Image: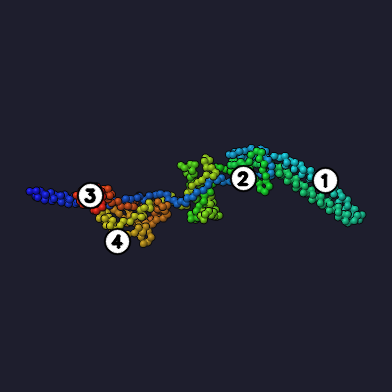
Amino acid sequence: MKAIQKKGLLITLVLLVVALTAWLVLRKNEEQSIAPETVTVKLADISKLVTATGTIEPVNEVAVGTQVSGEVEKIYVDYNSKVKKGDLIAELDKTNLKAALQQSQATYQNRQNEKNYYERIYNRQNSLFQEEVISKSDFEEAEFNYQNARLAVNQAASDLQQAKTNLGYADIYSPIDGVILSREVDEGQTVAANFEAPTLFTIAQDLEQMQVEANVDEADIGHVAEGQNVTFTVDAFPDMTFTGKVLQVRLDPTNEENVITYKVVIQAENKDLKLKPGMTATVSIKTLELHNVLSLEMKALNFQPSPEELKKLQSEYKPRVPVQKESSSETSTGKNMVWKYDQNTLVPTPIITGESDGINIQIIEGLAAGEKVVYRLNTSGESTPSAIQAEESPFMPKPPGRNNKKN
């Protein structure tokens, strides 16, 4: 009796295992249907960017110096002062310059008197020589002294003019309309202009118009041209995007540690004066801009179903999906191949593409706006390792080493 019960229990267990296994297989087959995931063909903007870093600079920056030495007597401006062209911004002490002018005036007058004296002698000697009263040597001596006196007057006149000019240099005027960026001297400080004019002030002409001087890598410079649109950000205003245009692509290269870059000058408006000289800018130069063109996400070009998936697709989405022994996302004519999804049907469609920004690609021919293109096949019901463990029957033996717990 006990043997019959054991045999019946064993048969029941075997039938249970077979039924559970069949249920799992049927469930898996039912759930593993292929569902296409798609993207939509649409109108969009496509742009290519060249990125670089640069520095904000004034469009025109002038260093104001002095051509004469002396002590700074008065300073009429300070940092950030607004000035107009011709404004007096500083004065040097004029004591020595005025004394030099007076001395030059006296010298000039003395040389003028000497010239007049020798001129009278020359005229008199010339008359006597014509009458053959004096010798030729006496006449030539009078002529020589007169010519030297004339040259001395010219030299004295030049020295007098230089003294007047030097006195005028003691007044420092602004050469442009602008803003004082820096002041290098203080009142009472002595400046020396022996070899070159020392800089007293730096003036920026117009801070409402700034420029970015960006260093572009040699690998990218071939794509950059004058007139291209630019966006850039600065650390001071990380949430703001500023705009500009490429003004100049300079030909002179810069070599730093064997890295070649070229300076690109970008014009930018600064009406609200947020941009300050010296700020670091992160620049994006738009080397290509296509507006409102037919486009598709590039991931759809990378999709190509495997032969097994094609067989499955043929059974689920027939009759428009052919079974191919070999598949490719590009046709023999160079056209890209995509898979269009329309009314529960997958259609292999050749297209011609244009420019790309790495995310979207321009569609020139083969697709229309609103059409859907497959970029992935999602097999529903694919189990994760944890799900597989949950579906395993406790009555089925486990492979060696798989989820065996140590006691």
Q: Which residue is mark 1?
A: 113
Q: Residue furthest front?
A: 407
Which amino acid, by three-letter code, is at mark 1? Asn
Where residue 191 sits, quadrant-wise, is top right
Say whether residue 76 is left or right of residue 271: right
Percent x, y for residue 173?
Answer: 65, 41
Mark 3 vs 4: CB contact within 8 A: no
The one nearer the camera, 190 or 231, is 190
**Distance from label 3 to label 4 (Cα)?**
35 Å
Residue sitting at 48 percent across and 54 percent down? 220
Which amino acid, by three-letter code, is at mark 3? Glu
Disc 4 or 2, which lies upstream in sequence? 2
Q: Which residue is mark 4?
A: 325
Disc 2 or 3, which lies upstream in sequence? 2
Where residue 314 sits, quadrant-wise, is bottom left
Q: Secondary structure under badge 1? A: helix
Disc 4 or 1, which lies upstream in sequence? 1
Mark 4, residues whose alpha carbon is within 10 Å: few (<14), some, or many (≥20)?
few
Residue sitting at 19 percent across and 51 percent down? 22
Q: Secondary structure under badge 3? A: loop
Of badges 2 and 1, the one in the foreground is: 2
Mark 1, residues whose alpha carbon is within 10 Å: few (<14), some, or many (≥20)?
some
On the question of residue 330 being in view, the answer is yes
Q: Which residue is mark 3?
A: 392
Q: Which residue is mark 2?
A: 63
Q: Secondary structure under badge 2? A: strand
Say whether residue 128 is left or right of residue 157: right
Percent x, y for residue 389?
Answer: 25, 48
**Distance from label 4 to label 1 (Cα)?**
116 Å
Which amino acid, by three-letter code, is at mark 4? Lys
